[in-house]
Amino acid sequence: MRTAGIMIQLFRLIGLSAISLIILAVFAAVSLKNEMLYAAMGKTTNLAEVARSTALTFHEMATRGEIDDASAQSLAKSAIRGMRYDEGEYYFIYDGQGNELVHGTKPEREGKNFINEVDAKGYAYIPDMIRLARTGGGHIFYWFPKPGSETPLRKVSSVIGVEPWGWMISTGVYLDDIDAQFWGALRDFALIGGFSIVFVSIIAFLISQSIAKPVRALAAVTARIGSGQYDVDVPATERTDEIGVLAGAIRVLRDEAKAAERLRTEQERFNRVLRTIGAGNAVLFHSVEEEELVVSMCREIVETGGYRMAWIGLVEHDEAKTIRPVAVAGHDEGYLSLARMTWADEPRGRGPTGIAIRSGQPQVNDCTEVDSTMRFWRNSVLERGYRSSISLPMKGARGVLGCLTIYASEPGAFSTVETVSLLVDLANNLAFGIRATRERRRREEMERQLNQAQKMEALGQLAGSVAHDFNNLLGAILGFAGFIVEDTGGDDPTRHHAERIIAAGQRGKTLIGQILSFARRGDLRRECFSMTELVDETRALLAATIPTTTQVTFSGQVEPMPVVGDRDQLQQVLINLCINAHDALEGQPGQVKISVAPTIGRGDAFTRLARGESDNPVEADNVWVDASGTAHVAVGSFDPALSHVSLTVSDDGCGMESLVLQHIFTPFFTTKNKGYGTGLGLSMVHGAVLAHRGALVVESRVGSGTTIEVVLPVSDESDGESVIDTSVIGSSLSPTGGRLLLVDDDPNFGDMLLTALERRGFEVSPFSDPLSAIVGLRRHRDDWDAVVADQIMPHMTGVDFIRAVRAECPDLPCILCSGYAEDNLDDESLKDAGIFALLRKPVDINELMEILSRAVAERGRAGKVGE
């Protein structure tokens, strides 16, 4: 193949160059036009960003509270409405519904909705602008007339959003200016010529490749930085020209913005913690009860601090080492019941809360997605939006009380040392607050118990004094009424009235006994007897006391079930419980069940008794209600190591609510109608059972009835102590007559005894003063067969008087009568004083006669032996 000559090659090269020049000229012109368009678009982007920054400045002023939000929006609109560039170019603003809020040159458009407006080509451009603003911004091409003209021209506008207010800000340039510049450039290319065209084209191409492209890249990076994307890479930083300088400046801007954002985030988190601490301290200051304290603390942490969820759990020292939730606030959504956390060293105890309790140190979970301690609960936690958490042990003087756990909806909410330190202080203050409320509650309870003990002490002293005087009155009343019964026939109305007086006196005697029992001042006769036999003996009394409309049933063990105590007093306990059970039926047919059985000793009540949590001396305010609505109370003492017997009385009556149950053992407290109850029945039961070192367990539910269980220690039959038998001595003894020395300072009771003794054949010398009686004794030393003396008298007690009598007449039998509950007369003191028998007022005349008959007879037998 023949090679062309140089010229041909040159022409070919020139032709190719010319073609290339033409192509390059056209390409350069088009590139220039595009570059101008890109520059215009970049310019409008920057200008729109300026307007957006202006709006955000006013929004930040409103956020800081310098102005309100409405004023901030108004000021922003005014500022943007007046902004101009390039000899009259303007801005316009739309909201999310297409309402035009600002138009720089056509204020008449403001306040109108243009969501459906179309340009000259039928294009509805407003919705697309709003969409671009919501998705980060962009550019829209459309047709719109210039200010002062009605002819639509092609225009490109940059769109950007103001998120806090839902605005769309836009500004643009008309493309006819760019078109005009494009055709002018073509004319210049034609005039300059091919070489110039080639040169300019080459230069333009090189410029476009070396400058425009990196500028566009840097503009895109700047826009991303402006939108908060601080992790973007900045290109062209390695260049040494102006582009490199610009790239370096943008990189510095990015780093500064990133640091400022980090600082702002940390400051916001710190402010959140400070708000939480302030609200928590207010809760600590104002809360009185523990429940109020923990519930209010969790609520303030969520509401004031803005955290996702907060809960407080207390440490249980049970076998499972349970963490018992006592308060929760925020978005729990069943998480705590699902989590079932523990502080034991096992899988469910190796989360932040369990570790915090075991170690006593705060545990921070910066990111739930990767934290290894959250793997057991990760899915449940992430579903509820817990992205980070902190578990704060609440330390007390004796160890960790529990844990305060806070969850946040963003990672790293508790990453700074300052945040952790402040929240640790809050948890320690909370622990102190819990201890303080518990101590305050304990002091209040101790003060209440002390006041109650002082009240009962004063009441007991009053009861003892009243009993002494009242027993003298009752003794006289019963004695004189008995004389009337003896002196009248069976059909005499006077006899009937006297019998009514005796019945009323016996009820008064029982009432005095109850007063002394609940005050724990009555005599406690210790003897060993069978509870089963006691219940059997009481059946007849109950049959005579309780109407037949109430069915009384008995069940239980056949074995004796021995106990040591006062048989009469415990029998009165059973009678009082049955009467209360009958009264609970409110006159309707019903059932009262009585049972005797070995004590099982299970359940919450016996757990509390064994721990000593229910040893309340009088009032049973240790009341709790279970899930079924049944109210419970337990008082007294219970030793699980000993055997016990339970005497249980239950009814199907009206039942009692917890508020009533708190006061059932309070003296004179009654729910019965006026005139139908003294309020001493259960007080006597309470005093008697606790005097026997026993316990009372009560459960009641409104509408379902009440069950009262009397728990007493079982005896091994060696605990009983012998007592002087002051009951019926024997029906074979009869009055023998004799001369008696009677000493009693109460005229009514003394006259009654004098009459009774004389009516039964005794010759009686009455004295009201023990000193005078001693003088009378000495005058007729050998004429006396027996002495009957009162315990409480002027100048000396009955015991001292009898000691003086025995010193004069060692073989003279002396009988002591006492109506005072504080005489502290036990078997040993009676024996030391040489007292033949002790009788409690009001004295049973028949019992006195039997004792006197025995005393006179025994002295007579002793005299014959001496002869």
Image (tube, helix red, strand yellow):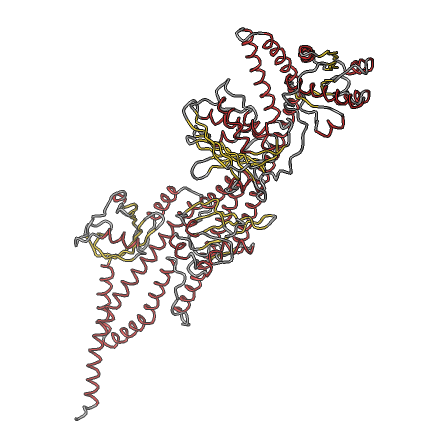
Q: Relative to 170, does residue 538 appear above or below in the rendering?
A: above
| Residue 355 coordinates in the image, percent (x, y) | 52, 56
| 168 lies left or right of 644 | left
As drawn, the residue found furthest toward the bottom would be 2
Q: Relative to 721, does residue 356 appear above or below in the rendering?
A: below
Q: Quadrant of residue 143?
A: bottom left
| 277 lies left or right of 221 | right
| Residue 620 coordinates in the image, percent (x, y) | 55, 32
Q: Relative to 546, does residue 186 appear above or below in the rendering?
A: below
Residue at the image position 68 percent from the left and 25 percent from the top: 822
| 226 lies left or right of 644 | left
Q: Is residue 288 visible?
A: no
Label count reads: 0
| Residue 624 coordinates in the image, percent (x, y) | 49, 37
Q: Is residue 553 visible?
A: yes
Looking at the rendered image, the quarter that the C terminus falls into is top right
| Residue 485 coordinates in the image, percent (x, y) | 58, 10
Report the front residue among 258 and 448. Answer: 448
Q: Relative to 450, does residue 17 appear above or below in the rendering?
A: below
Report the front residue among 530 and 97. Answer: 530
Q: Quadrant of residue 640?
A: top right
Looking at the rendered image, the quarter that the N terminus falls into is bottom left
Report the front residue among 711 and 525. Answer: 525
